[in-house]
Amino acid sequence: MCTGGHQLGAQVSAVLFGDKNQDEEAIASGADIVYLFEHPGESVMVEAYSTSITELLRAEKADLVMVHSSIRGKLIAGRIASQLGTSAISNVTGIRVEDGSIIAKHMVYGGAAIRTEKALSETAVVTIGTGVFASMPKEAARQGKIIEVDSNVDDAGIRILESRPKQGELVNLSAAKRVIGVGRGFANKEDLKMAEALAAQVGAEMACSRPIAEGEKWMSKERYIGVSGVVLKPDIYIAMGISGQIQHLVGVNQAKTLVAINKDKNAPIFKHADIGLVGDLYKVLPQIVEKLKA
C-alpha cells in the first residue's frame, strides 16, 4: 500500500499500533511519516483507535485512507468512514486520481461485476486487497519521520479475553510470480503430485479452487483463490482442472498470462485464458513434466 500510495499522491503516511519495530520497516517500504499509536493493553481491540485515527486524519487533511481488506480492516475502515461522515469503498481492485478526485473500482455481486465509483468526500476511505499494487524492494537507507501519538481509546464495551495464533499454513501467494492452481479435475488428493511436480520444475507456488480447500480439504484455505480467498497478480497463472466460475476468476484476472488446461472444451475459463489446452490432465501433465526435464 505504501508503493501504491506513492503512485497516487506526493506524501504517504502509515499508522501503526504499539510495536516500534515496525516503524523502520514501514519507512523502508515507502512511508514518509509513521504515526505510532501506543498500545494501551492486550485487552484493547484495534477498532478502539478509530476516534483517534479520525482526529488525526482531520488534522492532517488526508485525501485518501487505505486499509487492508481483512475482516478487521473492513470493520475499522467502516468506523473511520462513519466518523468522517462518509462510507467506505470495500474490495477495491483498482484506484486512480482523476482531476483531483479519487476513482475506485471494486467488486460487487460476489465478484460478478466491477463498479467504478468517484469519492465525493474530503477524505476517501477504501479497503485494498492483496495484488492491487505491485510490491517494491525495501530501501533500508530510506529516511522518514516517526511521530508517537497519544490515543484516546473508545470504550465500546468489548474487551479481548484471549488471543491464540491462527492455525494454518504460512504462504504468501500474493507475492508469487508463478502460480499453479488445481481444481476438481483431479479425482484424488494423491493425483495432485502431478501438479506439484510441474510446480517444482517451473518454480511456482501451488494454489487451488474453493472446493479443493473447503470441500475436499486437500489443501489449506491459505491457498484458496477467489472472491473470498486470495487475489493474485502473478506473471503467469496455470489453471488445471478448474472450470473457471466467476468467483474463481476474480482472484486471477489480473495475471499477466493465464494458461488453462481442461478436458472440457466448453469450460468457461477458456474464454479468459491467454493460452488454452484441451486435454485430459492425467495424460497431459506427465508429458509436460517430462518435456521440461529434457
Image (tube, rainbow, N blue to C red):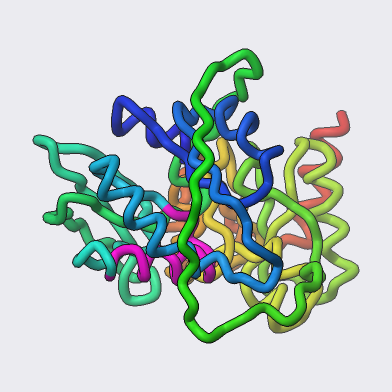
* The quadrant where residue 51 appears: bottom left
Image: 10 above or below 104: above
What is the x, y in percent for residue 48? 49, 69
* Above or below, comparing residue 239 to residue 19 in the picture: below
Q: Is 290 or 9 nearer to us in this picture?
A: 9
Q: Is residue 2 magenta?
A: no
Q: Is residue 3 left or right of residue 176?
A: left
Q: Is residue 232 left or right of residue 165?
A: left
Q: Predominant secondary structure in magenta?
A: helix
Q: Nearer the viewer, residue 8 or 51?
A: 51
Residue 23 seen by the camera: yes
Counting from the top left corner in percent of width and height, residue 72 is at: 53, 68
Indicate the position of residue 78 as horizontal and vertical percent values: 36, 69
| Residue drawn at x 79%, y 55% as measured from the top left | 170
Q: Residue at x 25, y 67 (%)?
A: 87
Looking at the rendering, the stretch of residues picked out in magenta corresponds to: 67-82
Q: Nearer the viewer, residue 214 or 52?
A: 52
Is 284 on the left or on the right of 132, as rendered? right
Q: Say which residue appears at 90% left-offset and 68% top-offset.
A: 190
Residue 141: x percent and y percent? 62, 13
Residue at 82% across, 37% down = 201
Q: In this view of the protein, can residue 256 be seen by the observer?
A: no
Above or below, 46 against 16 in this view is: below
Which quadrant, please, contains the C terminus? top right
Above or below: residue 209 compared with residue 34: below
Position of 5 compared to 287: left or right? left
Number of numbered discs overlaid on the protein picture: 0
Residue 81: in magenta span: yes
Q: Nearer the viewer, residue 257 or 210?
A: 210
